[in-house]
Image (cartoon, helix red, strand yellow):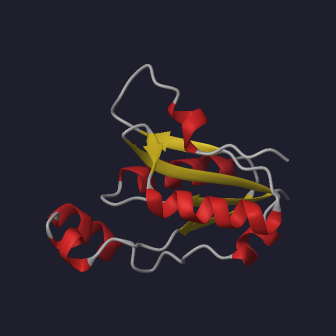
């Protein structure tokens, strides 16, 4: 059975919903799937300024944070991020760079953006073998 780790960052839940949809499709295809979030680095004051952000954090409190063990376990990795000014969220970017440097694994991403025509997927996360 193929093992897939879906690792995402989501402040208000949109990218989380995409991660769960990808999980559903992978499970339906017979994969064993882990959905993991990356650690939140925003300050409590910043989060409190956006009620949707706090609601999402509360709703996903039980989602485990990604670790290197998840990378070692997985045959394939998917990283999800909102794009901000054409770049991945800092919280995910930090983890992708760390994970890639530690394990030299192939990484692919699924961006979430309200812009059209930009190469957000290429900007989100690609790392060579």
Between 20 and 92, the residue placed more toward the observer is 92
At a point 62% along the width and 45% down the height, the residue shown is: 125
Q: Is residue 123 left or right of residue 100?
A: left
> Which quadrant of the rendered structure holds the N terminus?
bottom right
At a point 60% along the width and 73% down the height, the residue shown is: 66
Q: Is residue 8 visible?
A: no
Quadrant in which residue 48 is drawn:
bottom left
Q: Residue 109 appears at what percent x and percent y?
A: 61, 45
Q: Residue furthest top?
A: 117
Q: Is residue 32 left or right of residue 21?
A: right
Image label count? 0
Q: Is residue 71 above or below residue 61?
A: above
Between 129 and 29, the residue placed more toward the observer is 129
Quadrant in which residue 72 is drawn:
bottom right
Q: Is residue 81 above or below residue 42?
A: above
At a point 35% along the width and 28% down the height, the residue shown is: 115
Q: Is residue 118 above or below residue 63?
A: above
Q: Residue 27 appears at what percent x and percent y?
A: 67, 54
Q: Is residue 68 left or right of residue 45?
A: right
Between 32 and 108, the residue placed more toward the observer is 108
Quadrant in which residue 75 is drawn:
bottom right
Q: Is residue 122 visible?
A: yes
Q: Is residue 81 above or below residue 47?
A: above
């Amino acid at each position: 059975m193929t093992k897939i780790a879906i690792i995402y960052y989501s402040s208000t839940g949109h990218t989380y919903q995409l991660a769960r949809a990808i999980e559903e499709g992978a499970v339906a295809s017979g994969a064993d799937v882990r959905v993991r979030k990356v650690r939140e680095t925003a300050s409590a004051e910043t989060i409190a300024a956006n009620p949707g952000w706090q609601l999402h954090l509360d709703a996903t409190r039980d989602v485990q944070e990604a670790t290197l063990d998840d990378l070692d376990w997985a045959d394939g990795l998917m990283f999800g991020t909102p794009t901000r000014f054409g770049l991945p969220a800092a919280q995910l970017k930090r983890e992708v760079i760390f994970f890639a440097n530690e394990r030299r694994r192939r990484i692919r991403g699924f961006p979430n953006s309200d812009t059209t025509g930009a190469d957000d997927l290429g900007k989100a996360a690609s790392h060579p073998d």
